[in-house]
Amino acid sequence: MNRWIWIALAALLVVAAGVTLVAVPRGQEWTTSSPEALAEFEAGTDAQNKIYFAEAQEHYGRAFEFDPDFVMAKWRYAGALFDDDQDRAEELFEELMTADTSNLTPRETFFIERWRANRDGRTDDAARLLDEYHTRYPNDPYIVNVRANRAWNSGELEEAGRIYEDLLKIDPNWVTAYNALGYISMMRGRFIESEEHFKSYRYIAPDQANPHDSLGELFITTGRYAEAESSLETAIEIKPDFWASYTHLSIMNAYTGNADGTRAIIERAKAAGMPERAVFEMSCLALYSEMADREEWRQILDQRDSECVAGFRSGFAVVVTHRAACRTGDWETVQGIEDEAAGNLLSAENDGDGRDMAAIRAFLHHMQGVRLAIQGEYGAAAERFRAADDRLTFMQVDTGMYKLYNRMLLVETMLAGGKDAEAHKLLASVRSINPALVAEFETSGFRLLGLGRG
């Protein structure tokens, strides 16, 4: 699943539902007097569990309409609405801050009180509430899932994996745990293990788009492009508006130099009704990857102020523009791009946006490495490429493929600096992950940056 999907997941502020509960608080599950509201709410959780967010928003909205006092429906609807109508979502959130929770179930009370604590910046209270509730109800899969998510978001991958495994022991049908385990394994470079988790996910939920999409991401990262295309096309066949799969197909085509394939995907996405912004991002990827493949550095610089570049704080078009400036010796533009990235990083730090910080810092280190390598400062460049590698993960195909690409530039830099043995050792590790990408690199003569031998 692509990064914007994970942003949407975070915005919902809820966990997957629609499964059988084991050893959880007794009594009714959700507090509403309306059967119609309850039916819509359950349909919403089912859609959300499938990563079908538009449908989830519709169902939660109808549940809230049927019962405006249904606190959980109101909370989930506000989260689902946030990207489309932030003002209305904030109105609902403000109302929820003072909503009466005295008649809610313990689980509902936990979710609302913990959310309030986080919204107020009382992170210690939020953590305490989670620990207290888990102590009282250790086998409530909703709460076990929250604990796993907390560990994952804190970078405690081993602990997160252990908790997700516990979750599957409590409820083997909690399918999103398989998805999470697959991505955690990818982040740790355990691709065979990741494939096993994703295939378990697909086995349990073959009629859902996301298991096929997740497998597609793994196959792209490991260079199994034909399998990736088949898996992603299956996801689209199951759900023609599963936008992540179109994006992943475009990323695969960009890295394999298939410009015609990318344009075809864009046209299909448009016809299917993909949001304009997402189509625009794919179009930028297609344009800049094609120009970079043809080494049209001057043409790239002519579009320095285009929306593809100016519209993103970090991204492919920015990196390609920076490389074009380096290749043409336009050091003023190079410095301006790096200064802007540094400013964006500072803003992300001030906003406390950890995900944005990691992405911008990785791209900044990478761009610094490109500049230093082209300037002949091979040792310093290698340090910057390694710093970028440390901050890039295989969590998603866009960052995963970029991580491999960054490593190939490091190989080229080390070869240029006479570090042949070290370079070929690293190249072998990249080949073990994605042999197809390395084969193309070898065909180029190990000269993606056009460096000479030191």
Image (cartoon, helix red, strand yellow):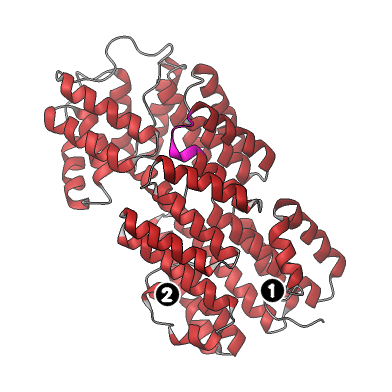
Which residue: 61% across, 46% down? 187
Residue 264 lies in the magenta stretch: no
Instruction: Assign a secondary structure to mark 2.
Output: helix
**Which residues lie in the magenta part?**
205-211
The amino acid marked with disc number 2 is Val
Q: Nearer the viewer, residue 305 or 153?
A: 305
Q: Nearer the viewer, residue 341 or 213?
A: 213
Tell me where residue 373 appears, x and y as whole percent: 69, 78
Which tag, 1 or 2, sits closer to the chain's start? 2
Q: Residues within 10 Å of mark 1 (few under 14, many from 20)?
A: many
Please state, as top left, top right, bottom left or bottom right, where the C terminus lies in the image.
bottom right
Q: Residues within 10 Å of mark 2 (few under 14, many from 20)?
A: many
Residue 222's disc is: none
Q: What is the total number of numbered labels drawn onto the structure image?
A: 2
Reading the image, the residue beneath label 1 is 381
Q: Nearer the viewer, residue 375 or 266?
A: 266
Q: State left or right for residue 431 relative to residue 312.
A: right
Reading the image, the residue beneath label 2 is 309
Q: State left or right for residue 321 relative to residue 430.
A: left
Image height of 235 relative to 86, above or below: above
Instruction: Assign a secondary structure to mark 1.
Output: helix
Which residue: 68% across, 84% down? 375
Tell me where residue 225 appears, x and y as whole percent: 62, 53
| Mark 1–mark 2 distance (CA, rounded to whole Å) | 24 Å
Image height of 134 relative to 293, above or below: above
Tell me where residue 204 appears, x and y as whole percent: 51, 26
Tell me where residue 406 appears, x and y as whole percent: 65, 65
